Amino acid sequence: MARLNVNPTRMVLTNLKRRLRTAQRGHKLLKDKRDELMKQFLDIVRENRRVREEAESLLKSAHSRFLMARAVMNDDLMEEALCFPKMKMTLQASLRNIMSVNVPVLSFDTGNASEGDIYPYGFATTSGELDGAIASFSAAASVLLKLAELEKSAQLLADEIEKTRRRVNALEYVMIPNLQETIKYIVMKLDENERGNLTRLMKVKDMMVEQMRQQRMKEDLEAAK
């Protein structure tokens, strides 16, 4: 603990006590914020794990079916089938607030496209495995977008948790102890000064009493003459 370099006066003491109360209130609020951020972070991490497993499953299925389609289809026919996509997707991004942290909300819009528009080819010359691969890739798109949203949210919350943790530690282990040590020092100095003043007043009183006693003795002697 380090004592602040201040003058030991009552006004400074009052200001330091006010700063200490403010620091203690801020410390409690930051601890509450840190705890709530941790709760939100853990919820997002659990959801992130579930969505990641779902995305990996869909991509694995799509990849397997695509390999099967390549095995049964001519390369030129497959390239021609996939060359001109029919569906157009528009990414939409917004923000939501979690404990003063703005995290992304991602979605996409396909306009008025129907479910069949995910297949950019006719079915006469293509394999059913290719249809399954395209369907799996299409289903994985929204899951991957959700995964990206959760990953970024977790990163932003983790950064904010670290910042809040450093602030809590700075208040708990540096600022508040320093203020308390300084207040204790000023109180001791003021008490010491008060005792010194009281001692001086007592000495002045004794001197005045002695002077009055000597004055009365002098007056009594003069009256006796």
Image (cartoon, rainbow, N blue to C red):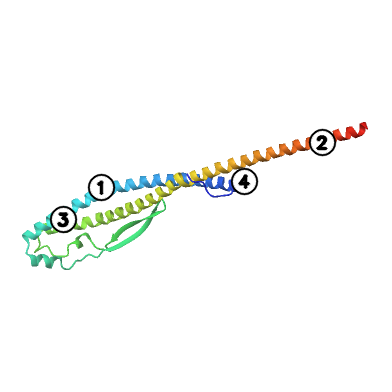
Q: Position of residue 48 (x, y in %)?
A: 28, 49
Quadrant of the snapshot with the C terminus: top right
Q: Residue at x 56, y 42 (%)?
A: 185
Residue positioned 66% across, 40% down in the render: 196
Label 1 or label 4, whichever comes before in sequence order? 4
First in residue order: circle 3 vs circle 4: 4
**Category of crowding for the residue at label 4, using alpha-carbon neighbours closer than 10 angstroms: few (below 14), some (14–19), many (at least 20):** few
The total of numbered circles placed on residues is 4
Asked whether 13 or 4 is in front, the reply is 4
Q: Which residue is mark 1?
A: 50
Q: Which mark is residue 212?
A: 2
Left or right of 137: which side holds 154? right
* Mark nearer the viewer, 3 or 2: 2
Q: Do residues under tags 3 and 1 come within 8 Å of each other at their CB atoms?
A: no
Q: Earlier in the sequence, mark 3 or mark 2?
A: 3
Q: Does residue 48 lie above or below 116 as drawn?
A: above
State which tag comes first along the sequence, 4 or 2. Answer: 4
Pointers 3 and 2 in contact (CB under 8 A)?
no
CB-based contact (under 8 Å), mark 3 and mark 4: no
Name which residue type carries label 4.
Arg
* Three-letter amino acid code of the residue under disc 2: Met
Read off the residue under disc 3.
Answer: 62
Q: CA distance from mark 3 to mark 2?
A: 111 Å
The CA span between labels 3 and 4 is 76 Å
Q: What residue is disc 4 on?
A: 10
The structure residue drawn at horizontal position 32% and vertical position 48%, both measured from the top left corner, is 44
